[in-house]
């Protein structure tokens, strides 16, 4: 039996699908991994822990495709080596989560593929490869429209006294945080983007409040304006988006795309099975 292991790795969670000629033999969800932000040892421990339930249970894995957040060229050799150690498979390919999203969302057709999750990203895909890519630049310089950006925007407005008093009081009650704690988590601890993204659900819970609705739409417009509209033929090319933020804020994401003159996006909640199908 020809087993393939396909991973859709985000900063918040990682989905592993073990397939036998397209049929799922195992489907696991584990913790998020970002090799660009974590030490090699932390990545090794996380991957070993996540793959332990399938280790040796289904036979020899012949091929692994790992698409992950933070899989920049500099860290890819280490990620491939770690997965080889964990699985015993010698045909391991690690690539960016953006390429994985493009292959899952677009299949073999041309399109603009986007991720709106803990972070954000986008690319123009020709049905095989990425042909244009606006760099995300991470939660400090970019990641517009992401969970991290929503949290960053919310907390910055809150601590600068720019939120309306009623919603500021609710935030203090539901998710109390001191300025010192904010600085500690954002500038001194690892995975700061994931920390900021924890506040995106607050925006979603209170989306009927005008300030929260305006904040969200503003972030989604910024994502499209700064990352998508300048791709060739962006206004006539299919637009496909995945990620927890895109799914949970779907009506506002669609509204922001329309305001930017883009097609109505196709929002896909679970790209992992489509990625496994791509590699069938």
Image (tube, helix red, strand yellow):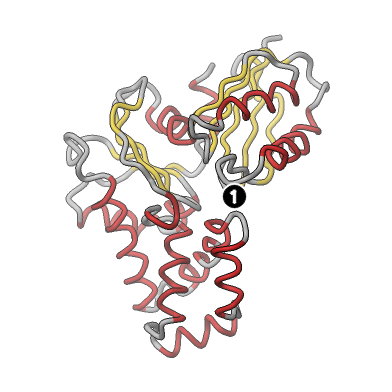
- The residue shown at (50%, 53%) is 118
Q: What secondary structure is found at the residue carrying circle 1?
A: loop
For residue 49, what is the image quadrant?
top right
- Compared with 108, 194 (above or below) is below
**Residue 195: image x %, image y %?**
58, 62
**Residue 60: image x %, image y %?**
76, 13
- Compared with 123, 140 (above or below) is below
- Left or right of 2? Residue 272 is left
- The residue shown at (47%, 47%) is 243
- The residue shown at (51%, 28%) is 95
- Compared with 80, 91 (above or below) is above
Q: Quadrant of the C terminus?
A: top right
**Residue 134: image x %, image y %?**
31, 40
- Compared with 88, 246 (above or below) is below
Residue closer to the observer: 103 or 208: 103
Tally the marks.
Answer: 1
For residue 179, what is the image quadrant?
bottom right
- Left or right of 48? Residue 225 is left
Identify the residue at the far top of this view: 1
Residue closer to the observer: 108 or 219: 219
Q: Quadrant of the N terminus?
A: top right
Residue closer to the observer: 132 or 82: 82
**Residue 276: image x %, image y %?**
55, 25
- Left or right of 12? Residue 252 is left
Label 1 crowd (10 A; few <14 / some 14-19 / many >=20) = many
Identify the residue at the far right of this view: 56
Question: What residue did someone put label 1 on?
Answer: 12
């Amino acid at each position: 039996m020809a087993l393939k292991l396909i991973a859709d790795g985000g900063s918040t969670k990682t989905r592993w699908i073990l397939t036998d000629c397209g049929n799922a033999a195992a489907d696991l969800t584990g913790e998020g991994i970002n090799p660009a932000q974590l030490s090699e040892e932390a990545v090794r421990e996380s991957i070993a822990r996540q793959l332990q339930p399938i280790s040796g249970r289904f036979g020899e894995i012949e091929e692994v495709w790992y698409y992950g957040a933070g899989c920049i060229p500099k860290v890819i050799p280490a990620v491939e080596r770690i997965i080889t150690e964990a699985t015993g498979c010698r045909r391991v390919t690690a690539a960016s989560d953006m390429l994985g999203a493009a292959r899952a969302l677009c299949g073999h057709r041309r399109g603009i593929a986007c991720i709106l999750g803990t972070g954000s990203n986008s690319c123009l895909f020709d049905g095989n490869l990425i042909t244009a890519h606006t760099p995300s630049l991470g939660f400090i310089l970019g990641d517009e429209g992401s969970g991290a950006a929503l949290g960053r925007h919310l907390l910055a407005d809150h601590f600068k006294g720019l939120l309306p008093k009623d919603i500021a009081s609710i935030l203090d009650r539901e998710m109390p945080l001191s300025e010192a704690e904010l600085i500690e988590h954002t500038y001194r601890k690892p995975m700061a983007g994931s920390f900021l993204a924890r506040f995106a659900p607050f925006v979603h819970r209170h989306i009927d409040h005008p300030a929260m609705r305006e904040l969200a739409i503003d972030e989604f417009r910024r994502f499209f304006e700064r990352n998508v509209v300048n791709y060739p033929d962006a206004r006539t090319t299919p637009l496909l988006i995945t990620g927890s933020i895109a799914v949970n804020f779907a009506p506002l994401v669609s509204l922001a795309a329309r305001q930017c003159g883009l097609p109505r996006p196709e929002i896909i909640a679970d790209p992992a099975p489509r990625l496994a199908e791509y590699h069938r």
